[in-house]
Image (cartoon, rainbow, N blue to C red):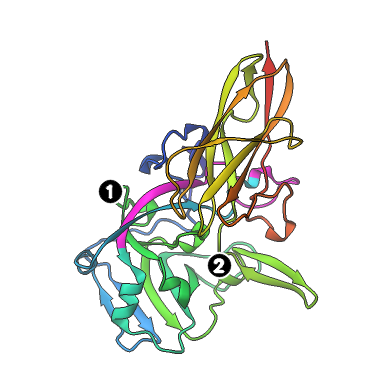
Amino acid sequence: MITREKEPPNLEMLFSALDSFVTPNERFYVRCHFPIPKINERDWRLKVEGKVARPFEVTMDDLRQMPTQTITVTLECAGNSRVFLVPKVKGVQWELGAVGNAEWTGVRLCDVLQRAGIANEAREIILEGADNGTIAEPPRPAGKINFARSLPVEKALNDVLLAHSMNGQPLTAAHGFPLRAIVPGWYAMASIKWLQRIIVSDQPFNGYYQSIDYAYWQRDAAGPNLLPLTTMQVKAEIAHPENNEVIRANGRYLVNGAAWTAEEVISKVEVSCDGGKSWSEGNLKGAPIKNAWRLWEFEWKTPSPGNYTLMARATDSCGRMQPMERDSNGGTYMICHCLPIEVEVRL
């Protein structure tokens, strides 16, 4: 793992280590905004409150008695690939590995909300983690805040999971022990770790990580408007070759990587070996699974010596294609354009 920050820990998988559909727990990237909270499961409770008929709290033993579900979901940090932005921007300097694919087991959020009986006027479901701290950069709220985000009621009642296990093992502290949300198809800031409170609200949530950070610009005739980040964009990344790798000329090289999208499946991955001038279709591996990445490969007949720019481009099942150009409205997030991998071919 690559250490991007020591405290709080922010760890990145070396993307060239990609060798399986499911990312091993020890290679799954770690994103923390505040120090990892120390939680004793015996004392931990999940509180459900707000616009509900029956507010309540549950223990982990209570949750384990509920019907469980296992789903395979890819999580990508909204700032993944930030190092590719020019000029350099603030934020954790992720390369390609702030993304992973895992099998998550837990209870459905909709089952928990059904038990509480949400009010007809409910608009959003706020998920709050136990992690907290102060914000260093302006504009900053006064005092400590908890990491929290909200979901529209429609999304919360659809496919959101409250997970206690990852790839068949209990969550570790770094991955949200004892309970975290898994929000399929959304950037991972929505998949709140160390979940401690669910608040049903009839008002839009304006928390710091909803309205100031993890937001993007929408510009129209009425002017610019800052909106919360939500769904992941269609994207393919190259695991091999690595950036600045030296490759033998006049041979064969297996280019490979992974591609993902939101709410759909990847239907095609193309590879360019000339900086985007021409494209060739790669081979998709395995069966498509909605909201899970798809591995791919492409056999490159390596040319004569020289410097070459490789790119991958994904298309999903509803026709969305990975763009060539960066959308600046994403700020320091949603880096989903075709990313250049520079290689040198030698005899």
Amino acid at circle 1:
Gly
Q: Residues within 10 Å of mark 1 (few under 14, many from 20)?
A: few
Q: Which residues are magenta?
A: 83-106
Q: Nearer the viewer, residue 137 or 105?
A: 105
Q: Position of residue 53 (x, y in %)?
A: 33, 89
Q: Position of residue 80 (x, y in %)?
A: 58, 48
Q: Is residue 254 left or right of residue 331?
A: left
Report which residue position mark 2 lands on. Answer: 209
Q: Is residue 175 left or right of residue 309?
A: left
Residue drawn at (32%, 47%) of the image: 167
| Above-or-below relation of 208 to 102 | below
Q: Quadrant of residue 268?
A: top right
Q: Position of residue 293 (x, y in %)?
A: 48, 47
Q: Quadrant of residue 222?
A: bottom right
Q: Residues within 10 Å of mark 2 (few under 14, many from 20)?
A: many
Numbered label attached to residue 203: none
Any part of residue 297 in sight: yes
Q: Give the SS element for disc 1.
A: loop
